Amino acid sequence: MSGLKDAGHLFRFAGLFVLAFLIFLVVRHYIVPKSFGQYGHYRGAAMGEIAAHPAKFAGHDACETCHSDIADKKKTGKHAHVNCEACHGALYQHVAGPEQPKPGLYQRFLVMVGKAIPPDPAVLRHADDPSTVVPVKPDTATLCVRCHTASAAKPKGFPQVNPAEHSNGMPCETCHQPHNPAIDAGGAK
Amino acid sequence: MNGVEGFMYPNEIGLQWSVLIVLYPFITGLVAGAFILASLERVFNVTAVKPTYRLALLTALAFLLVAPLPLQLHLGHPERSPEMYFTPHSTSAMAMFGYVYLWYLMAVLVLEIWLDYRRDIVLMYQNSKGLLRMVYGIMTLGSTNISERSLAIDERVGWIVTLIGIPSAFLLHGYVGFIFGSIKANPWWSSPLMPVVFIFSAMVSGIAGVMLLYMAITKLRKHKIDVRCVDTIAMYLFYIFIIDFSLEMLDLIHRIYEADESFRSLNFLVHTQLFIPHIVIQIMLGTLTPIILLGITQVVKLPEIARKRIYSVAGCLTLMGIFAMRWNVVIGGQLFSKSFLGFTTYKIGLVSKEGLLVAIFLTLLPLFFLWVLVKLLPPWGENTTHATAGD
């Protein structure tokens, strides 16, 4: 017993650890959100919150519903796989009108299982008048060079130019039609 | 705007990890190294280094308290840092480090210091007044039992704690090397030797740091420096430094021989931007010079004053060299593009959140903590002899 008595101070130190651990558990109980770990190492409720964000991109399917002539032209050219909104910007509002509906349950489900939000026809409804949000026509003099300025890091087969030497200051669309940029495809229209 | 030569990906132009991330492994290295020095006396019975035992422990604690601050400042939102304890992420090395840090702080350093000082704490509690008495009273945890038997128990438990502390110190600093060594996208860092190099460089810096602190503080206290003690420390420093240097050279030779796709880019970097910090400061001034100086003291019988001067110079150069090593790892690893086609530059700010002044402040802060600890728990007492509990 005297051994235990002489080791009493060690029990006090150990007691401090136990006390700190208990406080930790209590604080943890109140601080960690209830939905934490529901799907992984994050707050499960965050999924719904993110899914509730208003959509910004409509997706090329939505654009091609009206602009089928452009889609036809584009699919035969080098830019076939460049999505419309990559150059024209996010245009959900143009498609759906200025009033943005809240994402539907299906959209939320897709987000929950980790898939991207697809253009949902029920959600991406046409506004009565898409002209309420009119997209600005991109300036090809600044737009094209974003991808086509020569850089050592780009693959050799990728068309790249020194813009100043290549066009002599003229906008790219003078010779290249952006939706189908090969010169033999017709140039500016 | 950083100066860029050749091609850099946009997210490589500005460095993500600043001088504070250089400071972090430097500080934790001092902690691990100081603890290893303390364990020499406690576990390995190197009685000659006894005068530095307690100072080494307090140094380790002072630096360990400051170790997370560079990370807190770099990351911002310090209020979020407890989250890594509340929601432990077992597959994230960085997240698990919180536990390593806490273990090392509480279960190793604080416990060992408390056990070692318990007799003194009780005596100081009984002989002090006012606020100081209250502080010592809290530190006794309400137990004033300093019977021979209870002190013998402390001795044995303290020995076990030190024994556990050695792998813990390796884990603490090995982790820092692991963080860099495991980044496979960065050829400057990605090497399984990195944790081992970090551990040995930590031992070198910690031993040099405590040796310098001991000499400086003893001089300031106008006491006589125990030359046998600094001779022994310098001898260990010399041997461990040779191992550290050999490992670093092994890593370097391996890279040169392997000469993978990153080699030309890294080789160019070492011969241009990193020439001064890596070749001149780290290898020539910070490694070879102190090894030669310490080597001279091992083979030539020099007078006491000359040896002390050599130890001071070698110690300072060692710390500079180890800091340069951290700098070259952290900053050097971010100066080249992962495309191997370009380089950026790092310009340290002066008064920014991660600038020079903050770095200097964080370097000096542990010394202030050490001053407070030394005032509170004087390491110079007679009661620093340990029975050979492990025998």
Image: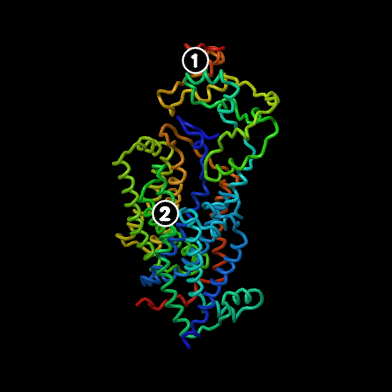
Is A85 in front, or is B68?
Answer: A85
Tell me which colouring the rendered structure shows. Answer: rainbow
**Which quadrant would the C terminus of chain B be assigned to in this image?**
bottom left
Can you give x and y, in whole percent of width and height, for residue A108 in the image?
59, 43
Q: CA distance from mark 1 to mark 2?
A: 56 Å
**Which quadrant would the N terminus of chain B be assigned to in this image?**
top right
- Label 1: chain? A
- Label 2: chain? B
Can you give x and y, in whole percent of width and height, for residue B67 in the image?
52, 57
Give the residue pinned by disc 1: A166
Give the residue pinned by disc 2: B318
- Circle 2 sits in a helix, a strand or a loop, which is it? helix
Asked if the residue at tag 2 contacts the one at tag 1, i.e. Cβ–Cβ closer than 8 Å, the answer is no
Residue at image x 65%, y 24%? A135
What amino acid is at disc 2?
Thr
What amino acid is at disc 1?
His
